[in-house]
Structure formats: C-alpha cells, structure tokens
Amino acid sequence: MEATVKKYQQKFKKVKDDMDRWDDLHARLLSQFRNASSIIGRLQLIDDPKNYGFLKDIDNVKDLIFRKQMESLQMIMLSMNKTLEELNIIILSLAKTYRDAKQQLKGGSIQFSTKQLSYRLGVKPSIADCLEGLRFLHEMYQSEYLLKSSVISAIAGLALNPSVSDLQAFEQLLVDQPNIPKEEGKNKVFKRIMMI
C-alpha cells in the first residue's frame, strides 16, 4: 500500500512540473492578450482623420497604418493560438496522468478494496486521496483552458467592433484564472498529497 502511495506521489511531482509550465504559459498569454488589446484600442484612433495632423496629406496613410496594425494583430493572434496549443498539451498530460493512475489500480498485481483505497498510513494520503487529487487538478485546469480559449476566440470579433469595457473584462478573466483558485489548487492539493 505504501509503495502505491509513493508511486502516486511521483505522479504528482510530474503534475507539479505541468502546473509550473502552465503558470509560465499563462503569463505569456496574458502579455500577448495585452498587446492585442493595445492594437484593438488603437484601431478607433486610426479611423479619426484629426489624429494624423500633417500626415493626413500623405496618400493612403490611414489605410497603410490600419493594414500594418491589422498585420501585427494577426501575428499576435497566431502567437496566442500557439500558446493555447501549448496549454492544451498540459491538459492532455494531466488527463494521461489521471488515466494512468486509474489504470495502475485496475491492472496492478494487487487489487485493493474500497476500504483499502481509503486507508491512511499516519499522515500520508490514502490512494483514494491521490486519485481524487489527480482528477480534481485535471478538471480544474481543463475548465480554465476552455475559458481561456473562449476569451481568445472572442477577441478576434472585438477587432471589428472594439469595446474597451469588453477588453478589460476579458483581461480580468485571464488575470484572475477564476477556475484555479490558489487556496484550492496547488497549495491545498499538494500539501495534502505530497506529505511524506
């Protein structure tokens, strides 16, 4: 039983690496989003001829600037989609870790009863705690990934009809990561599972 719990703790070490990578990618996605928001905010200014001063006499200056801004926005959108793909790889890794952990119980040489799965040795977590923690982490990060994907999809529509309040609301969703509260995420689960 103790050996099985140690195997699960090893799985949590891999999950912790995935979660650290998530934090790095989240910071990158937020930076990309802010860059895209800045461009979208400028699109309204580009449309107003009085913002050009003496440059308004240059042929097609408005169209040239608008096109350059749209090209930059497109590049940022591609970068955000790439970051989302990398976040999805983490979700797939978390799902695989959870599946492997469940399979380890089914296919192992020792078959545990429900009571044995809930049994604790001292302060160490039970096998059921470990499995539940893996499931919880996967579901939490998957929900957050789906929210981020929706926000990034919505920003493309804002380029055509910019709204500062919408951009601010979307940014707040990305900053807060509402589906990954720190007190329930890394801290709570890892303190409980990684006890030695």
Image: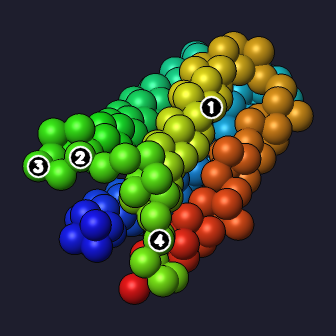
Q: Secondary structure at mark 2?
A: loop
Q: Secondary structure at mark 4?
A: loop
Circles 1 and 3: CB atoms closer than 8 Å: no
Circles 4 and 1: CB atoms closer than 8 Å: no
Q: Amino acid at mark 3?
A: Ser
| Residue 131 spot, x, y in % from top left | 42, 51
Q: Amino acid at mark 1?
A: Leu
Mark 4 lies on residue: 120
- For the N terminus, the quadrant is bottom left
Q: CA distance from mark 4 to mark 1?
A: 36 Å
| Residue 82 spot, x, y in % from top left | 35, 35
Q: Which mark is residue 11?
A: none
Image side of residue 167 versus residue 134, left or right: right
Mark 3 lies on residue: 109
Q: CA distance from mark 1 to mark 3?
A: 40 Å
Please rate how many residues cluster around mark 2, counting C-alpha atoms within 10 Å: few if below 14, some from 14 to 19, many from 20. few
Q: How many labels sit on residues?
A: 4
Circles 2 and 4: CB atoms closer than 8 Å: no
Q: Which mark is residue 147?
A: 1
Q: Residue at x 11, y 49 (%)?
A: 109
Q: Earlier in the sequence, mark 1 or mark 2?
A: 2
Q: Is residue 14 visible?
A: no
Q: Camera-side residue: 176 or 157?
A: 176
Mark 2 lies on residue: 111
| Residue 100 spot, x, y in % from top left | 24, 43
Q: Amino acid at mark 4?
A: Arg
